[in-house]
Amino acid sequence: MIYLRYSEDDKVFDYVTNLLKEAVERKDLLFVNMLVINETIWILNKKYRIPLSEIIELIDRLIPLLEIIPIDYGDYDIMKKIMLDYGLKPSDALHIASMNKMGIRHIVSEDKEFDKIPFIERMWLDDH
């Protein structure tokens, strides 16, 4: 979501916009959890200095395309196991817990840490 608003590289911007466009055309189900929304707002605002009103406008346009996975206490056991077994940081482990809850096996991320998880396929521009 971050690269839909800010990217230092046209190749990355083109990748994420085409990925979203193709997913919408195929009517793929696209999932996020509130951690993704949180990270998007924080990084765009604090790191890239994008005004909060612009970030909220972007998210408001994207929300209708997304299913939001609720996070609850039941995710803790999976999160804990992922952190201990694969050394992921808590927020990344919580993403995996959310995905597990919904049976999701693909994640769009440049974060190679997700490659440690054998039952998840990370999608990113260098990989495809």
Image (tube, helix red, strand yellow):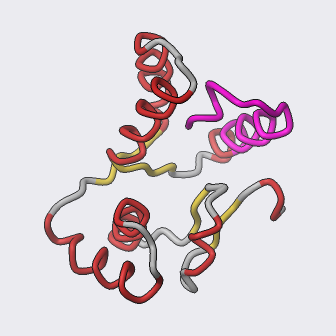
Figure check: 63 above or below 84: above
Figure check: 16 above or below 115: above
The verdict on residue 9 being magenta is yes
Figure check: 47 above or below 72: above
* Residue 1 in the figure: left or right of residue 3: left
At horizontal 42% and vertical 45% (from top left) the residue drawn is 36
Observer-nearest of 86 and 31 = 86
At horizontal 39% and vertical 69% (from top left) the residue drawn is 93
Measured as percent of width and height from the top left, residue 119 is found at 54, 83
Figure check: 48 above or below 32: above
Q: Predominant secondary structure in magenta?
A: helix
Dividing the picture into quadrants, the one containing residue 110 is bottom right
Dividing the picture into quadrants, the one containing residue 91 is bottom left
Measured as percent of width and height from the top left, residue 62 is found at 49, 29
Observer-nearest of 46 and 106 = 46
At horizontal 76% and vertical 33% (from top left) the residue drawn is 13
Range covered by the magenta-colored residues: 1-22
